[in-house]
Amino acid sequence: MKIAILDAATLGDDIEFGMFDGLGDIAIYQKTAPDEVEERIADRDVVILNKVKLGAGNLPAAGHLKLICVTATGYDNIDLDYCREHGIGVCNVKGYSTDSVAQLTTAMALSLVNHLRVYDDYCKDGSYTASGIHNRLEPVFHELRGMTWGIVGLGAIGKKVAEIAQAFRCRVLAYKRTPDDAYNCVALRELCKSSDIISVHLPLTEATHGIISRDMIGCMKSSAIVINAARGAVVDEAALADAMVSGRLGGLGIDVFSTEPMALDSPYQALLNDPNVIFTPHMAWGAYEARVRCMEEIALNIEAYMRGETRSRVDIL
């Protein structure tokens, strides 16, 4: 069995791949540019990847390919139709990053609600020392207790965030295509209008592309905080940027971008110096424990495939 990891650099320098040693001959590439994909998958039976795109444009070069393993829950970078047609299995990993993403989502919410960046800068730039005053209470911040936290997408991560929000005594609203009786599920517009914090936890599909639209953003509270740690393209990035620039939103936490890394022409570039905006480089999923868990699950998926099992297969859903 010949295995290739196409973008090991996206998994962190502290991750080892010893769990794959007994599965076959493994080639590890730190990065794979689009024009390098065909050569690197040509003789491989199994390909492991994170962000590299595989589809009709490059998969015909893979004459021996039997299985694609995505080191993520989302698999929108894989052409499933092509894989189904040509008998190539595709596996993802579910649940490995639930705690990690929920933790980053909560950290963003807490930082933005408490204006931590402003207060931190005030101390570090010498203003606090020079003030002669024991404390500062501007900008005003509020307790989470009693706020409404809207959760868009109620999978494992959304439910974990709901649990955390409830621990802070927030009122939780949720948007889910198929409502869950265990939660207060409402229409998306109602959620956007009523929530003080809105966090997005949706996969990217045709149905969810741009679901947080300019129209939805326009009906949000002017004090609302929006957090996206799902996929960049599930929100209208230009509309979010416009809302922040014009003061029609209270805060923004963004971990994912429609083009990654963030492009020079991204509308978010206008917000780089905004103290009420937090950008992180698509790292919410990547706590060390989550990454180790993900690699262990990938190894189990390959072993299951070799036994003729369909563990974590998304091409046969």
Image (tube, helix red, strand yellow):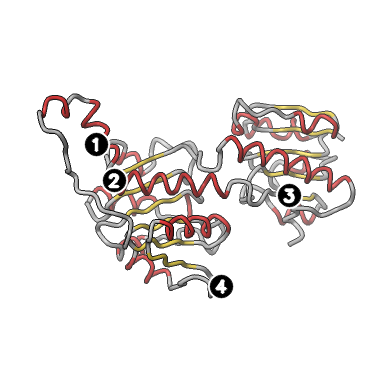
| Image x and y of residue 255, in percent | 45, 43
Residue type indicated by callout 3: Cys
Instruction: Look at the picture and state if 262 lies above or below 200.
Output: above
Q: Name the residue under label 3.
A: 91
Label 2 crowd bin: few (<14), some (14–19), many (20+), radius 10 Å: some
Seen in the image, is 218 located left or right of residue 51? Answer: left
Q: Which of marks 1 and 2 is nearer the N terminus?
A: 2
Q: What element carries label 3?
A: strand
Question: Marks 1 and 3, Cα distance to the nearest angstrom?
Answer: 45 Å
Question: Marks 4 and 3, Cα distance to the nearest angstrom?
Answer: 25 Å
Question: Marks 1 and 2, Cα distance to the nearest angstrom?
Answer: 9 Å
* Of residues 74 and 289, the one drawn nearer to the viewer in this rendering: 289
* Of residues 226 and 61, the one drawn nearer to the viewer in this rendering: 226
Question: Marks 3 and 2, Cα distance to the nearest angstrom?
Answer: 40 Å
Q: Mark 4 points at which residue?
A: 178
Mark 1 and 2 residues: CB-CB less than 8 Å, in contact? yes
Label 3 crowd bin: few (<14), some (14–19), many (20+), radius 10 Å: many
Q: Mark 1 points at which residue?
A: 119
Q: Earlier in the sequence, mark 1 or mark 4?
A: 1
Q: Which of marks 4 and 3 is nearer the N terminus?
A: 3
**Which residue appears farthest toward the front when viewing the image?**
134
Q: Earlier in the sequence, mark 1 or mark 3?
A: 3
* The N terminus, quarter of image: top right
Residue type indicated by callout 4: Thr
